[in-house]
Image (cartoon, rainbow, N blue to C red):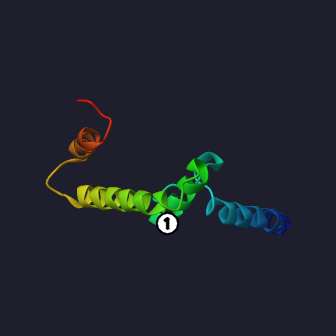
Amino acid sequence: MKKLRYALLILTLLSPVGLFAQADASDHGPAGGPRRGMMSVDDELNMLSERLALTDAQKPQVKTILQDQRDQMKKLMEDSSTGRDEKFSQDARNSPGVVG
């Protein structure tokens, strides 16, 4: 009976800790960094607009580039004819500024 009471006490005290950890984990990735995964094109555009102080004329151009990049990555990831290593080496060869 004493062990059961002790176990319930420990469980009661630790339950809120787990709930807070789960709530916090949804906003952050490993080691408290940003969540992993792709941002939406609009979110990425907003982030770049703030960081680079893009003009209203530049924003649609950057959005087109981001959407094209997203479409190419999606096509590359859906391509089952190549292995993972080949996909990344193709991506690197096709990236602007990469000499190879």
Residue 35 in view here = no
Q: Nearer the viewer, residue 72 or 52?
A: 52
State left or right for residue 38 relative to residue 80. right
Vertical order, 96 against 71 (above or below): above
Q: Secondary structure at mark 1?
A: helix
Locate the C terminus by quadrant: top left
Residue 10 makes an appearance in the image: yes
Q: Residue at x 30, y 56 (%)?
A: 73
Q: Residue furthest front?
A: 57
At label 1, counting other C-alpha atoms closer than 10 Å, the crowd grade (few under 14, some 14-19, many 20 or more) is few
Residue 54 shown left or right of residue 20 in the figure: left
Q: Residue 35: where, in percent of width, then height? A: 56, 56
Q: Quadrant of residue 85?
A: top left
Q: Could you say where residue 98 lies in the image, as x and y percent from the top left?
A: 30, 34
Image position of 86 with respect to 43: above or below: above
Q: Nearer the viewer, residue 58 or 30?
A: 58
Q: Residue furthest left?
A: 81
Residue at numbered disc 1: 42
Task: Identify the residue at image location x=30%, y=62%.
Answer: 71
| Residue 66 x %, y % | 39, 58
Residue 19 horizontal/vertical position (percent): 71, 67
The answer to whether 33 appears left or right of 5 in the picture is: left
Q: Which amino acid, mark 1?
A: Asp
| Count of picture labels | 1
The residue nearer to you, when weighing 35 against 12, is: 35
Query: Observer-nearest residue: 19 or 84?
Result: 84
* Figure quadrant of the N terminus: bottom right
The residue that appears at 32% across and 59% down in the rendered structure is 68
